[in-house]
Amino acid sequence: MSVKQSIPFELTPENKCSFCPGTKCCNYITQQIDAPRSIDDFDHLLWQLAHANIQAYKDEDGWFLVVMTRCNYLQKEGNCGIYETRPQVCRDYSNDYCEFDAPAEEGFEFYFQTYTELDNYCRKRFKNWDKRFKT
Ligand code: SF4
Ligand code: SF4
């Protein structure tokens, strides 16, 4: 049963976030990156994904690095501890149709959550992937 099905009354924009398990959108940041094209580009991205809590995805807006990290101002109850002065990006994020309704990855063309996933993709994309090292 989904979270939404178990809620006994109507969700509204005002109460929706209080039912969101873990307050999903306050637990990561994204940063757009240049689209990787060459072997060197993908090798660099692979280095980034070798680090804890780093992911990458591509959607209709391009390539993004994801850092899975909880906002320091997210309160235990799921509230924002700096609501009145929260950054603009937080203000711009609408809960009309958000990750509570559908996982963000549904709109991704590529989604690499681990080093191994990206390494496997690169091996298929580049025939000489395993011979890429210069030294
Ligand atoms: S905007 Fe959506 S994803 Fe973010 S806390 Fe509210 S319901 Fe959850
Ligand atoms: S500042 Fe507030 S709204 Fe923005 S990510 Fe942190 S807890 Fe969420």
Image: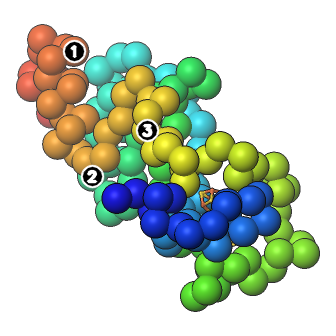
State the residue position of label 2: 50
Task: Measuring from the top left, give residue 81's x and y in whole percent.
Answer: 75, 83
Q: Is residue 85 left or right of residue 63?
A: right
Task: Measuring from the top left, give residue 76's x and y in whole percent.
Answer: 58, 88
Mark 3 residue type: Glu
Q: How is the image coloured?
A: rainbow
State the residue position of label 1: 125
Q: If you read the primary sequence from the N terminus, does the residue marked by circle 3 or circle 2 appear first?
A: 2
Observer-nearest of 47 and 116:
116
Observer-nearest of 52 and 107:
107
Q: Gap between marks 3 and 2, in whole Å? A: 20 Å
What residue appears at the point 61 percent right and 47 percent down from the top-left corner?
98
Task: Measuring from the top left, give residue 83's x and y in whole percent.
Answer: 83, 75
Q: If you read the primary sequence from the N terminus, does the residue marked by circle 2 or circle 1 appear first?
A: 2
Q: Is residue 69 left or right of residue 12?
A: left
Observer-nearest of 116 and 108:
108
Task: Measuring from the top left, give residue 59's x and y in whole percent.
Answer: 51, 26
State the residue position of label 3: 105
Q: Is residue 92 above or below residue 108?
A: below
Q: Is residue 62 left or right of residue 48?
A: right
Q: Callout 2: 10 Å neighbours few (<14), some, many (20+)?
A: some
What residue appears at the point 17 percent right and 42 percent down from the top-left corner?
116
Mark 2 residue type: Ala
Q: Secondary structure at mark 3?
A: helix
Q: Is residue 123 left or right of residue 1?
A: left
What residue appears at the point 37 percent right and 28 percent down from the top-left corner?
110
Q: If you read the primary sequence from the N terminus, does the residue marked by circle 1 or circle 3 appear first?
A: 3
Q: Is residue 79 visible?
A: yes
Q: Callout 1: 10 Å neighbours few (<14), some, many (20+)?
A: few
The C terminus, quarter of image = top left
Which tag is nearer the camera, tag 3 or tag 2? 3
What residue appears at the point 49 percent right and 30 percent down from the top-left corner?
107
